[in-house]
Image: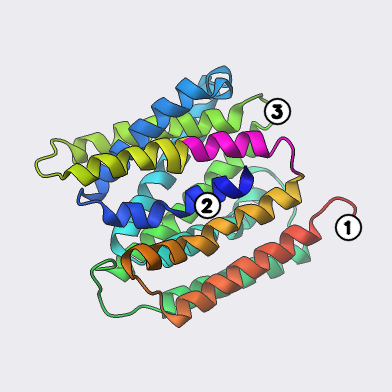
Amino acid sequence: MVVAAALLFSTGGAAIKSLTLTGWQTASLRSLVAGLVLFAVLPEARKGLSPGVVPAGCAYAATLVLFVLANKLTTSANAIFLQSTAPAFMLFLAPVILKERIGRREIIYSITLLAGMLLLFRGESSPAATAPDEVSGNWLALGSGFTYAITLIALRRGASRTGTAISVVAAGNLIAFAACAPMAFPIVRWQASDVWLILFLGLCQIGLAYGLLTRGMRRVPAFESATLLLAEPVMNPVVTWWALGERPSLWALGGGAVILVSTIVKTWLDRPGR
């Protein structure tokens, strides 16, 4: 279930790029479908809903929107790899917000993530049909990493509340829909394929994926879950290459490899008993 969720997550870049809708329209409609599905299908989403999820929900909504906008401008690989730098932001924010201490291991980890990020920005190439403005897209993707870090910190502060995480995801999607609506509507031009892609993004890429993830993680230890979920950033550029022929630069692949390998090592070292 965890692997299936990661693979569904990984289809986001290709599907977003295949839509003829604008980034605002894509973000708004995808989140509308996803939010309704999550609240309708997952009891955890409804049970954990409270005013306390709003701050984290807003941060997650910003993550969703920035990720979609980034995918419209830069390569799918850059978008997902830069969003994966969220742990580096957490290491700087946690001492301030959560009063947590940073150890030597965390400092080394953050440095490797920043190195990978610099390689991604170094890998800017000439504009392509699927990545017309890599510079702007990269900054938006980096912003999604920052807002995702804020989301995770907010979730950690409310970790004792049952159903908080999935409630934040569901609420965040509806917040994203409402926030993007003024820029998204009216929709003047659209194609039949856009309808199917929006339904796929909302129902499967988010709704079904989170349903599988929440159930799978109940039976899989934390380390294995975190490692299996890395299939998303690995497969995301592969799916986009297969579907649209988009090829990330060698610099981008190198930066992504640095981010993924350092994350695996950090997760391994942080296992209980080590």
Q: Quadrant of the C terminus?
A: bottom right
Residue at 26 percent across and 50 percent down: it is: 23
Residue 177: which quarter of the image?
top left
- Which one is closest to the eye, mark 3 or mark 2? 2
Distance of mark 1 from mark 2, alpha carbons? 30 Å
Which residue, given by chain and number where applicable, does mark 3 sit on? 160
For label 1, the residue is: 274
Residue type at mark 1 is Arg
Dominant secondary structure of the residues highlighted in magenta in the image: helix
Helix, strand or loop for disc 2: helix
Task: Look at the image and say whether residue 254 sits in the magenta stretch.
Answer: no
Q: Amino acid at mark 2?
A: Leu
Determine contact: label 1, label 2, CB under 8 Å: no
Sort mark 2 into few (<14), some (14-19) or many (20+) by Cα contacts within 10 Å: many
Counting residues from the N terminus, which is met first, the one under dot 3 or under dot 2?
A: 2
Spatial CA span between label 3 and label 1: 25 Å
Give the x, y percent position of residue 152.
59, 43
